[in-house]
Image (cartoon, grey):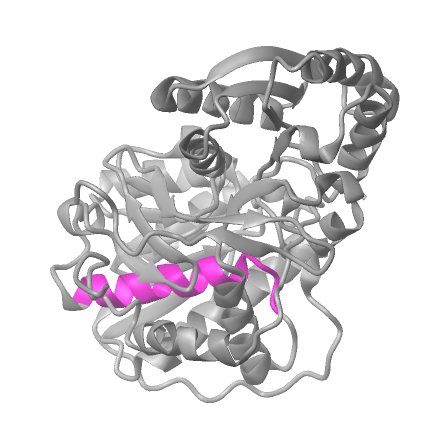
Amino acid sequence: MTTTGTMRTERSFFTAGLARMGGKARAWLRKARTAAALGLGLALAGCGGGFGDMFSDIGPGADQQLAQPQQTAPKQPAATGTKVALLLPLSAGGSLGSLARAMKNAAEMAMIDAGNPDITLVVKNTAGTPAGARMAAQAALEEGAGLILGPLLAGNVREVGAQARARRVPVIAFSSRAEVAGNGVYLMSFLPSSEVDNVVRHAAKTGKTRLAALIPATDYGRVTGAAMDRAARKYGVSIVAREQYVRTRLGLRAPAQRIGQTIAAGQADALFFPEGPKLLAAGGRVLSAAGVLPQSVQLLGTGLWDTPKIRTVSFAHGGWYAGVDPRLVQHFANKYRQTYGKTPPRLASLAYDATSLAIALKRHGGFNDAAITNPEGFQGMNGLFRFRRNGIIERGLAILRVTPTGPQVVAPAPSRFSGS
């Protein structure tokens, strides 16, 4: 492993909800477990049947690395064949470094599960800096990497993408900033735009077509607000009221009061509120005071609700958001825990899926744009996904309902993409 650049601490905190598994869930997971062990089943999908709420490059889930006894991971099988580079900020401090090390573990777990992966995983440390990412990419390319997985942060992805394009090597990165995708860079991440599209589609399908919105005045608000506009046009939803707010309790109060008046007057049947638990609870109190009851409007959210803390927000109970089926989330967490003796951050699963995808691509067509963008997509630890030619990932997500005991599936994720 090559160490590059200087260490930069970039603090981001992430959360994810885990549901308990029963006997039916275990039976349901048999197919997913088999597919994962075969490297996404690849099996194309069509054939295989704090400020924990901040918008970041990484997404929800990285602060869930619980302190548990460390275990020794099983020895990896000998890997030969095409080199695939994994670029992560392994020497970064805080939760960023913890996430990177867990992603490395998950990638190695995918190699173990593949049995005879026919690739060599070459791990490089970006240190979380653009300069470090550039040096790591240069080293990996000089060593003959035919595919690059990572890095995490948008600025690092830009540097790596420029290096890889010159060698015609594709990049499957983990940033959630859609603007860094394209020109050979594909994003294996949870994108807010996909979550919004899925939940607005479901709302429209169930007759909720008059939408009010409370949007934070942040980058996350800009992205989710634009996604809401696109989805509304796409699915025939009218946006009857929109308010933007400064992300404080005081800044939220007046906009929430105005939205509350609109809903109380019967002008809206759904409220899009892409906010985390703390301010969601504060907004709920203001809306309740304005006469808005949870049963009088369908609350819609995003992946910021994918945290155990959301179940403590009574106003959110019954609200919908799009996400990975909790049984899949639990399956990966259990598998990782059995291997490494600790609970993984939610996003470690992205490295597992990316590595499994690399193994499957090597076996079925190689590292080229046509194979990566196969319209039928793939099944991974996080369910159905495919890449568009612009590098953006499209996920088949479940629609989840917030309850006091954890998320419940109200509409299952699709087993295949329509039109594929």
Residue 147 lies left or right of residue 191; in this view the side is left
Prevailing SS of the magenta stretch:
helix
Count all numbered tags in the image, as a single digit.
0
Judging depth in this view, the residue of 172 and 162 nearest the camera is: 172
Q: Which residues are magenta?
A: 344-362
Q: Position of residue 151 (x, y in %)?
A: 46, 49
Q: Which residue appears at 38% of the width and 79% of the height?
A: 30
145 shown above or below 284: below
Task: Name which quarter of the figure residue 18 lies in.
Answer: bottom right
Q: Which residue appears at 35% of the width and 49% of the height?
A: 172
Asked whether the viewer can see residue 124, the reply is no
Judging depth in this view, the residue of 71 and 138 nearest the camera is: 71
Is residue 343 part of the magenta span, yes or no? no
Q: Position of residue 126 (x, y in %)?
A: 52, 52
Q: Position of residue 171 (x, y in %)?
A: 32, 47
Judging depth in this view, the residue of 153 and 133 nearest the camera is: 153
Residue 308 lies left or right of residue 157; in this view the side is right
Q: Position of residue 102 (x, y in %)?
A: 57, 66
Q: Quadrant of the C terminus?
A: top left
Judging depth in this view, the residue of 113 and 194 nearest the camera is: 194
